[in-house]
Image: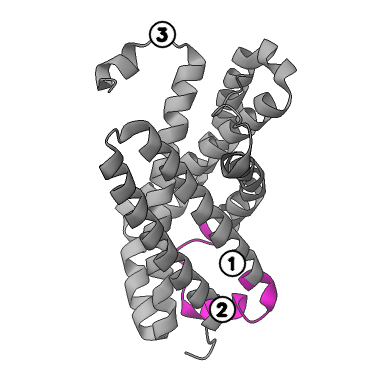
Amino acid sequence: MVKFREYLTYRGGPGHWSWILHRLTGVGVFLFLLVHIVDIALVGWGPELFNKLLFLYRYPPFRVGEIVLAGAVLYHALNGLRICVIDFWPEATVIHRKLVYAVGVVFAVVFIPTAFYMLSAILK
Amino acid sequence: MNGAGRPRPESGLELYAWMFMRVSGVVLLFLALGHLLIMHIINNVANIDFQFVARRYATPFWRTYDLVMLWLALIHGLNGIRTLVGDYVRSKGWQVATLASLYVFGFVLLALGSLTILTFQPHG
């Protein structure tokens, strides 16, 4: 079993970090999906119960969590696309480091304005 | 031979699982990011309620969209967790126990989610 510290100090380069982040965001989004299936199932019990329970998601801490969730889905999607590129076009391994950085750049360009927009929607 | 993700298995069920993660991943990139954009950015929890769902589910289009997304996302997530169990759970006994509960839990949520989408009555 690899110790946690060894994960952080292993010199695998940027590919190592994108691998860790892919696993973390994957587990995070999966856990939210489980909760989300159950909360939306409440819609089957009619408007009163459903509308009452949605208030929970309107609390600011949940809205901030929603932004984190959006970031996790976006990162997992972009990095997953990178994995597909490398897996199906092995020639791309020549630029694999560039692809890792490209994921970071596209993520930042899309996520930062989105996060600001979602934050401003909370404060409204 | 070595891609960015898990190395491509030689054949059989493992190869199908490997391929499924990549194909469903690319489809989910559009479905899940589209879902986030529509339900969490253009609209958000502040204006989503039972009536919103009722209007949305009046035609089969969004029900189909949500059903496809639910199945792909949940199976993609379950298979991801299966990979993590294989990597981090060392004892064979715990592996079997973890995977068995994962599959039962996954099946229940898949059934619950599908029932929610398919049996929703707009009039409560």
Secondary structure mainly formed by the magenta segment: helix
Judge by depth and name the residue closer to the eye, B90 or B80: B90
**Is A91 part of what is drawn in magenta?**
no
| Pointer 2 local density, CA inside 10 Å: few below 14, some 14–19, many at least 20 | some
Residue B51: x percent and y percent?
Answer: 51, 80
The residue under the point 63% across, 82% down is B58
- The residue wearing badge 3 is A11
Residue B36: x percent and y percent?
Answer: 55, 53
- The residue wearing badge 1 is B67
Magenta part of the protein: which range? B39-63
Residue B20 visible, this angle: yes
Disc 1 from disc 2: Cα separation: 8 Å
**Disc 1 to disc 3: CB gap under 8 Å:** no
Provide the chain ID for the residue under circle 3: A
Is A39 left or right of B10, judged from the image as shown? Answer: left
Q: Which amino acid does label 2 sit on?
A: Leu
Q: Residue B118 carries which label?
A: 2
Is B114 left or right of A39, judged from the image as shown? Answer: right
Residue A124: x percent and y percent?
Answer: 43, 56
Q: Judging from the image, what secondary structure is the residue with disc 2 in?
A: helix
Is A2 left or right of B49, judged from the image as shown? Answer: left
- Vertical comparison of A58 with B81: above or below: below
Provide the chain ID for the residue under circle 1: B
